[in-house]
Amino acid sequence: MFIIKNKKIFIGISVGLVVLSFIFLFVFGLKVGIDFKGGALTEVSYTGVRPVQADLNTALDSLNLGSILLQPTGDTGYLIKSRDLTETEHATLLNTLSQNNISPLEEKSFNSIGPSVGKELTQKAIVAIILVSLAIICFIAYAFRKVSKPVSSWKYGIIAVITLLHDVAIPIGIFTLFSHYKGIEIDTLFVVAALTILGLSVSDTIVVFDRIRENLRNRVETSFPETVGKSLKQSYVRSICTSLTVILVLISLAIFGPASTKYFALMLCAGMFFGTYSSIFLASPLLVLVEEMQAKNKTKKKK
């Protein structure tokens, strides 16, 4: 019952973190990659030893071609993301990458992504998140249709979506700081990470809600807050241990995995952490808060 008794404190912490994340987002903004704003994507493979990434970054910065993102691929290649390049600029880029033919390379691909493609990706990402949220509300409302008292089943769905927005907003706020201070650009992996967080987080929340549903059906406690408190006590160890195993894998991927997936893993890691937090310290306290507000309204109407 410790969590339920101090529900306003935990809800306040969540609200504060979400507000702080939105402040970071509006003040710093996110740097979008070529997947969203358009640009050029070049992939090269070296026939010999691959040059050191730091040396190539220094050489590329001197070309004045704008922001260029260099990512290692495999053991011998690099993936280069840049703005649209002319034929001359493209040739200059390849010459710089080969270190003036000191390090022979093979260009595996060169593609241009137009702004219209980036706009379409942005629209699809927004639509995907909205559809996922609506599907979650409908699913939970149906699954909990037999639990209508004291909180209606559709309110479980609304609360689940609120926690999902919390779980996505905070990692985005953290990623905004990376974007501002480290120059990291968001790409399609960013959208994949956000959708993955939605799926993983709602799974954890539903596990806790399902325990509440079973305890309400079996009437293990006399009051709703006590039932929710006991349900949390029965499920929080499982939630924390399950999330911890995933977080450890993601940390390993961020440390030992390829550079191209480093920030993807870190965002997922943050999403898992705050997803577990919200399932225990936000979703269930919100249920109790809704029930208390309903009780107060009924009392006022009687008067």
Image (cartoon, rainbow, N blue to C red):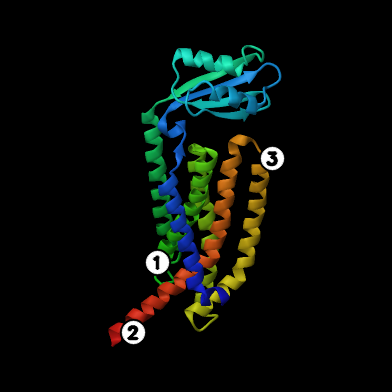
- Reading the image, the residue beneath label 2 is 299
Of residues 171 and 139, the one drawn nearer to the viewer in this rendering: 171
Asked whether residue 122 is in view, the answer is yes
Q: Residue at x 68, y 45 (%)?
A: 252
Asked whether residue 228 is in view, the answer is no
Amino acid at dot 2: Thr
Label 3 SS: helix
- Reading the image, the residue beneath label 3 is 256
Q: Would residue 141 appear left or right of 255 to someone viewing this image?
A: left
Q: CA distance from mark 1 to mark 2?
A: 20 Å
Q: Position of residue 135 (x, y in %)?
A: 41, 53
Q: Nearer the viewer, mark 1 or mark 3?
A: 3
Of residues 246 and 132, the one drawn nearer to the viewer in this rendering: 246
Q: Position of residue 260 (x, y in %)?
A: 59, 35
Q: Residues within 10 Å of mark 1 (few under 14, many from 20)?
A: some
Q: Position of residue 177 (x, y in %)?
A: 51, 46
Q: Residue at x 49, y 29 (%)?
A: 67
Of residues 51 and 279, the one drawn nearer to the viewer in this rendering: 51
Q: Nearer the viewer, mark 1 or mark 2?
A: 2
- Reading the image, the residue beneath label 1 is 155
Q: CA distance from mark 1 to mark 3?
A: 42 Å
Q: Residue at x 63, y 64 (%)?
A: 238
Which quarter of the image is occupied by the N terminus? bottom right
Label 2 SS: helix
Asked where in the image residue 19 lies, by quadrant, the reply is bottom left
Q: Residue at x 61, y 15 (%)?
A: 106
* Residue 108 to residue 37: above or below: above
Of residues 276 and 219, the one drawn nearer to the viewer in this rendering: 276
